[in-house]
Amino acid sequence: ITALNLRCIERLYGDHGVDVKETIRKDPAAALPVILTRLKQKQDEWTKCREDLNLVWADVYEKYHYKSLDHHSFSFKQQDSKFLSAKALVSEIKDLKKKSQKESNIPHLEYEYLDRSIHEDVFKLAQFSSEEIWSNKEKMCKVLRLWNSFLELMLGVPANEEIGNGAADERSGDVDERVFYGNEDFYVLFRLHRILYERISLAKTYCTGGGEMNGPGEIQKILLVHHILMQGRYIPYKPNRFENHEFEDECRAIIGNQSYVLFTLDKLLYRLVKQLQAVVADNKLLQLYESEKSRNTVYYENARILLHDENIYRMECVRTLIQSPHYVSPLRNLLLFIDPENLFQSSSPPRLSIQLMD
């Protein structure tokens, strides 16, 4: 018997371990058969215990597998609140303006909207969040009307319903150009909308493995993410809903360890909807936009008079339209005025540029 065997026997018998070792030394022939029986009994107990624990740990491993691969979410959630603040967004464009002072006529921020379908996802999220935040239906309708009649049209998205086209629309040849001069509230609104657009886009990209959807499995994952986001299973400011950690676990399982971009979705939506409310409350710039949309130079000067000492932000969205061969005719200009969406077969992705004016 080795020293290791004796230590194991001593631990097995606990307080009587020293006495058992002494018995083995004095009369091994009598002691060892009894000890062997005890060891086999203990081995059976430990084997059963290990099997029971393996079942428990298998559930734990499965539950925390995706979380163990997530190295970003903790720091991301800490930093995102600061990143989404109006102060941080304004500071960002001011810093960019300082760096490009020699070139005064170039935009400071530019974004391209490659996937039109994401606009629908973003709208549904904003719509659901509005319903959760406000019980006043009239207030909610005002916010969503602004989204449809102004925000989406500015970004080159056709209106979902007939609520009036309030977009400044200048066409030069086959280029669709929309220009708006706004204050800090409007700038923050466009930035928050873009951030939400980017995060939903990233979630969909990671959901499909970074490529095109190539099978029913990938499509089902997209639908499941859509269900989680759209059906209100996770709204922290509403009691008795989907818990925070459950939502994160669902996203990790579906999207992978890049799903952390959705973990602060509730805070981003809340800021976005509240920003919409702030813009709706002060509609002087929207009224000016409606009246001056065809007179760009006069429009800017009047915006400056209206805003006094406030910073002016120039938001411009441009897309190149590809004309349908069915509409090459002398009636082109009339059709352009009556039905511009059907006159053109397709267009390049809308490109939004934002410039902090002098």
Image: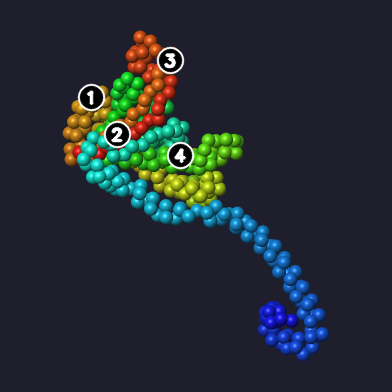
Is any atom of residue 129 visible in this view?
no
Label 4 and label 3: CA atoms lie apart by: 32 Å
Amino acid type, label 2: Met
Q: Are marks 1 and 3 in contact (CB under 8 Å)?
A: no
Against 65, residue 117 (above or below) is above
Tell me the number on the disc at residue 295: 1
Q: Nearer the viewer, residue 96 or 190?
A: 96
- Residue lying farthest to the bottom in this orientation: 26
Tell me the number on the disc at residue 201: 4
Label 1 and label 2: CA atoms lie apart by: 15 Å
Q: Residue at x 38, y 39 (%)?
A: 194
Q: Residue at x 66, y 61 (%)?
A: 54
Against 322, residue 1 (above or below) is below
Image coordinates for residue 165, horizontal then vertical, percent: 34, 24
Q: In terms of sequence position, does the residue under pointer 1 or pointer 4 come before the other?
A: 4
Q: Residues within 10 Å of mark 3 (few under 14, many from 20)?
A: few
Label 1 and label 3: CA atoms lie apart by: 31 Å
Q: In terms of sequence position, does the residue under pointer 3 or pointer 2 come before the other?
A: 2
Q: Residues within 10 Å of mark 4 (few under 14, many from 20)?
A: many
